Amino acid sequence: MKDNCLPIDRLKETTRQPIVAVIGGRLCDEEIRQFAYLVGKGIAERGAILLCGGKSGVMEAACHGAYDAGGLTMGILTGEDDSEANSFVKIVIPTGIGVARNSIIIRTCDAAIAVGGKYGTLSEIAYCLEFEKPVCSLKSWEIDSVVQVKTPEDALDFVFANIAKPSKLTGDK
């Protein structure tokens, strides 16, 4: 066995960071941009990975907040060109599958925060409900079964209270 590899029995002992998706539009006003920035910053400060669609607007503001707080950001792009990602995305995943990537974002995350947004955000909220992922809405769609929150702090409190415990994240029983 190489010195830099964990033995198989130790892999179960490691826990991964939670992954929180921030979903919202490529275009947003200053209030939504500020909310997204604070959500992203809070995700990083609470030790989670921020996942988003990787482009502009809400996605860029959230990544900027997480980046400023020293967090890890991931962007799953609709296109094939990694240069489409905003400058605050540390891990860029170009898919070339268009908006079908919305399903991948939600499958990958442990919980999601919707900030503003239009129909693409609505589809991601629907995937959260379908895949039974915790999701809240901050100045976004008002839908039955989706918790409405008023502040970025409320959104963060909701998400982190509803994320599975580390044992579930690692697959341990």
Image (tube, helix red, strand yellow):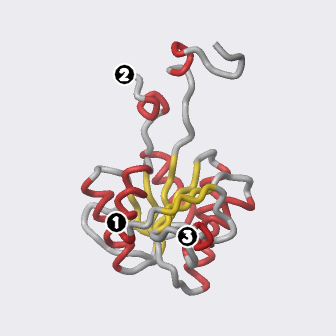
Which is closer to the viewer, label 3 or label 1? 3
Tell me, for residue 169, which label it has, or none.
none
Q: Which residue is mark 3?
A: 81
Mark nearer the N terminus (3 vs 2): 3
Residue 94 coordinates in the image, percent (x, y): 51, 63
Tell me, yes or no, if residue 154 can be seen here: no
Q: Secondary structure at mark 1?
A: helix
Q: Amino acid at mark 3?
A: Asp
Q: Secondary structure at mark 2?
A: loop
Tell me, yes or no, if residue 42 can be seen here: yes
Which residue is drawn at the image coordinates 52% and 53% (left, top)? 157
Q: Residues under labels 1 and 2: Cα distance?
A: 32 Å
Q: Amino acid at mark 2?
A: Lys
Q: Which residue is mark 1?
A: 100
Which is closer to the viewer, label 1 or label 2? 1
Q: Which residue is mark 2?
A: 173
Give the image quarter of residue 171. top left
Which residue is drawn at the image coordinates 57% and 61% (left, top)? 153
Q: Secondary structure at mark 3?
A: loop
Q: Amino acid at mark 1?
A: Ala
Binning the other alpha carbons within 10 Å of mark 1 as few (below 14), some (14 to 19) or many (20 upward) gives: few
31 over 156 or under it: above or below? below
Which image quarter is the C terminus in? top left
**Is 152 placed left or right of 67 in the picture?**
left
Residue 50 coordinates in the image, percent (x, y): 57, 55
Q: Residues under labels 3 and 2: Cα distance?
A: 40 Å
Q: Nearer the viewer, residue 109 or 41?
A: 109
Which residue is drawn at the image coordinates 58% and 82% (left, top)? 31
**Is 74 placed left or right of 4 in the picture?**
left
State if disc 1 and disc 3 touch (CB < 8 Å): no
**Is 54 placed left or right of 106 in the picture?**
right
Mark nearer the N terminus (3 vs 1): 3
